[in-house]
Amino acid sequence: MSDVVLYDYWRSSASYRVRITLNLAGIAYRPVVVDLVGGAQKSDEHIARNPQGFVPVLDIDGLRLTQSLAILDYLDRTRQLNLLPDDPAERARVQALAYAIAVDIHPVCNLSVARFATTLSQNAPDMPGDWMRHFIKPGLQAFEAMLGDFEQAPYCVGSKPGLADLCLIPQIYNARRWQVDLSDMPRLLRVEEACADHPAFVAAHPDAHAPG
């Protein structure tokens, strides 16, 4: 049994990013489900792991790490994954791609925010779908435009998966879950197609981790 433990939830975008990265690094891990729908993230047991009550939490190398981008950075630096370019200018440009999703789209579309928005709307019939589509569609359109500054060969910024791909693919999964039309985003769709053939992405897909 692996000493590496990932506390995650199958549909969590942040957990999905970490699963892909662990697979890229060839790190075997033991998954422990934290049921976000059932409220397990608020349990005393999980709050002891992460005071924010979020997933993922990764136990690795004698450390307990939280926040997916911090976890990805740790894995990148300790396992030499080269998720970002070395050149400072190019590094900043690729980080901007990743952050456009992980910092701008994802936080307003997580489960707790969508639930609160639904409550404020007095359970309007099209919530939370309208909420999700309102933020995901324009956010991904902006990402599509940003991709125009890079060559997709075939991934977001080159010939191997990087930080931008690790953030994009989980967000595409959410977009499809909420019926967001992606037909006007050909660059993004080409990246999705390339990642769909990569074993690290296939093994991390939510369908492979769904309960039951």
Image (cartoon, rainbow, N blue to C red):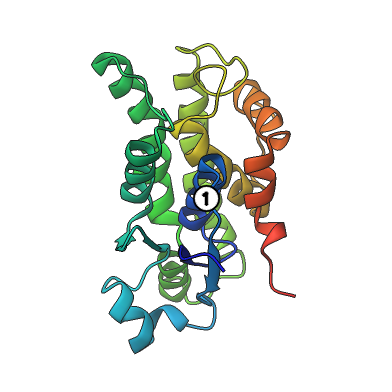
User: From the viewer's perspective, is 187 left or right of 119?
Assistant: right
Kindly give the residue lying farthest to the bottom in the view shown. 44
In the rendered image, the vertical position of residue 149 relative to residue 98, given as above or below: above
Up-down relation of residue 25 to residue 45 (above or below): above
The residue that appears at 59% across and 59% down in the rendered structure is: 129
Instruction: Name the residue: 32% across, 37% down.
Output: 77
Q: Say few, some or many: other residues with alpha carbon within 10 Å of mark 1 (under 14 / 14 to 19 / 20 or more).
A: some
Q: Nearer the viewer, residue 112 or 123?
A: 112
| Quadrant in which the N terminus is drawn | bottom right
- Describe the element under mark 1 as helix, strand or loop: loop
Image label count: 1
Q: Position of residue 159 (x, y in %)?
A: 57, 17
Residue matched to label 1: 27
Please name the residue shown 45% across and 60% down the image. 110
Q: Is residue 113 left or right of residue 197?
A: left
Give x and y (percent) for residue 52.
28, 70
Q: Residue at x 59, y 64 (%)?
A: 10
- Residue 185 location (% of width, % of height): 62, 26
Q: Quadrant of the C terminus?
A: bottom right
In the figure, 135 relative to 44: above or below?
A: above
Q: Amino acid at mark 1?
A: Ile
